[in-house]
Image (cartoon, rainbow, N blue to C red):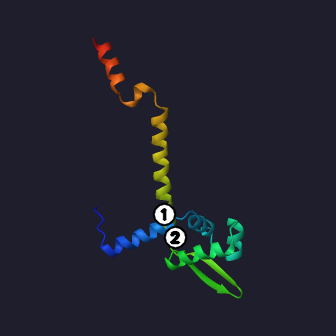
Amino acid sequence: MTLTLTQRMTELVARRFRLLGEPMRLRLLQTLEGGEKPVNEIVEALGSSQPNISKHLQALCDAGLVRRRRAGLNIYYAVADPMVFKLCRLVCRSAEEHTRAELAELTATPGARGGGAKNGSARRREGK
């Protein structure tokens, strides 16, 4: 199945990836994965300043990934689009596979790497 994206959809996808390209925003989403939290609890969990957290929460809200509600003096945030966690898991799984493949290549014995000129020469001499 081929995915065909319109110009507008491509722009929306790129915007979402740019939004998720900020580590603090990923940490915010991870903090909210367990459920709704007030800002002060998020600030405490992440050890950052309240203005910085609020700036990133606003960006996530504007993109529809997070929602907020006011209760008295507190503002509570929650994940509005849980699909973002599936996306993160896919990216993490891909990164793990890539890292495993790189590690396997680094730790492979010279003969198991698929033969450069040196390995090919050795095989030719053995065959004669």
Give the class, few, some or many, for how many residues have Cα within 10 Å of label 1's Cα (few <14, many ≥20). few
User: Can residue 105 be seen from the camera position used here?
Assistant: yes
User: Can residue 36 be seen from the camera position used here?
Assistant: no
Q: In which quarter of the image is the N terminus?
A: bottom left
Q: Is residue 40 left or right of residue 87?
A: right
Say which of 78 and 51 sits in front. Answer: 51
Residue behind mark 2 = 82
Question: Looking at the picture, which amino acid does disc 1 mark?
Answer: Lys
The image quarter in which residue 6 lies: bottom left
What residue lies at 40% left-to-right and 69% top-to-bottom? 13
Q: Where is residue 51 in the image (x, y as percent from the top left)?
A: 66, 76
Say which of 62 and 35 sits in front. Answer: 62
Q: Does residue 10 sit above or below 93 in this rendering? A: below
Q: Does residue 63 sit above or below 112 in this rendering? A: below
How many marks the image carries: the answer is 2
Q: What is the C-alpha distance between the residues marked 1 and 2?
A: 7 Å
Residue behind mark 1 = 86
Q: Position of residue 126 (x, y in %)?
A: 32, 13
- Picture disc at residue 13: none
Q: In which quarter of the image is the C terminus?
A: top left
Question: Looking at the picture, which amino acid does disc 2 mark?
Answer: Pro
Determine whether the residue tagged by mark 1 lies in a helix, strand or loop.
helix
Give the class, few, some or many, for how many residues have Cα within 10 Å of label 2's Cα (few <14, many ≥20). few
- Direction top: furthest residue: 128
Mark 1 in CB contact with mark 2 (< 8 angstroms) = yes
Q: Where is residue 63 in the image (x, y as percent from the top left)?
A: 49, 76
Q: Does residue 101 sit above or below 69 in this rendering? A: above
Determine whether the residue tagged by mark 2 lies in a helix, strand or loop.
loop
Q: Does residue 90 sit above or below 38 in this rendering? A: above
What residue lies at 71% left-to-right and 86% top-to-bottom? 73
Q: In this view, does 36 lie to the left or right of 16?
A: right
